[in-house]
Amino acid sequence: LLALKKLFPKLGAEAEEALAKAFVMWIIVCGDILKRGDDRTRLDYFICHDRALRFLSQSFALANQCMDTKAYTLLVYLMLKAGNYYQYDIIRSIILLKMLIEKTPNDFPLRSRFYKRLGDMLRLTGELNEALEAYDVAKMLFKYEKNNYGLANVLRSCGDLLRLTEEPKKAWEYFNKSEELCRQEHYNLGLANVLLFRGYLLKQIGKSKKALEYFDKAEKIFEKVQNKLGCADVFRGKGDLKIIKGNWSSAKELYEKALPLYIQLQNSMGESYTLAELQLCQKHLGDDEGRKKCLEELRKLLPKQPERVKEDITELIELADSI
């Protein structure tokens, strides 16, 4: 890509077709790599995946300099496949998403998805007001499209953002709206996620018994629709409830159920949080060897995590060290 960027200004119009073909081939290959995810069990594949992610922003720079709007159709295809890129490099993701929004002014279905994703990224950087603004635009676009699935998802995200800003009543209202749409559309996965996030909110405000009820309801639906990520999130939520009660052994068992699911799904953020919570349990239970293994894995994962995630995990490690 670097060579292409240097050579392009020197190439004549006859090179445009050849360059376009090369670009398409590159995107197809990288799209497949990024869709399959980050497989740390195979060193060769891990390296390839890592490079594909790092070249992603270069591909946008190339398209921006020397290709027409057709290039962005290809880049949209690539970015929709590259779900884990957003975890890999939050800052560049925000830049690329804003670029995509700018380049797709009349494509409302794409813009709604990009604004929703932009809100998710801004939330991870702690820019909560900006995240809410992005969600508001996504809501407007989803309503315009009459896309109730997308609208239900962004309403849930709004509710969870308000949970973080300690506005539980407003958060609950958003969850109500999201749940209503999910039930109306028979959107079971969306419903399970809303129930899960209700559990998070109830846990946060100290209603552990009620939170557990919602976690149980969510788990049943996640199992029914065979959604492993949802099940992993439920196990983590239940583990947190056990920690609140000081039941470290039960919490450890739940985190150990969640961990292999995150690993299988190559969800490095969920894996990182689970390892951090697990090492805290192990410190309380006197399992020094188990904690050592968790910390070794965390050292491999943390460099790829957003700063906010790194801060959360560092706090959990420091808390365990202080015991």
Image (cartoon, rainbow, N blue to C red):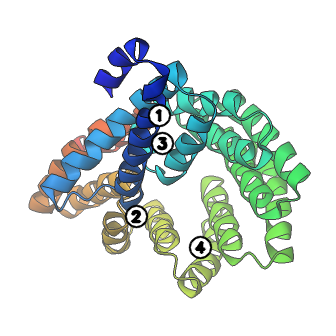
Farthest bottom residue in view: 224
Q: Residue at x 79, y 44 (%)?
A: 108
Q: Amino acid at mark 4?
A: Phe
Circle 2 crowding by C-alpha within 10 Å: few under 14, some 14–19, many from 20:
few
Q: Nearer the viewer, mark 1 or mark 4?
A: 1
Whole-number angstrom distance, CA of label 3 to CA of label 4: 27 Å
Are the residues flagged by discs 3 and 1 in contact, CB closer than 8 Å?
A: yes
Q: Amino acid at mark 1?
A: Ile
Q: Secondary structure at mark 4?
A: helix
The amino acid at mark 2 is Gly
Q: Is residue 259 above or below residue 129?
A: below
Residue with the most extreme left position: 289
Disc 3 marks which residue? 86
Report the residue at 63% width, 37% height from top.
118
Q: Give the camera-side residue of 128 and 104.
A: 104
Measure the C-alpha gap from mark 2 to mark 4.
19 Å
Provide the residue designation for mark 1: 90
Which mark is drawn over residue 215?
A: 4
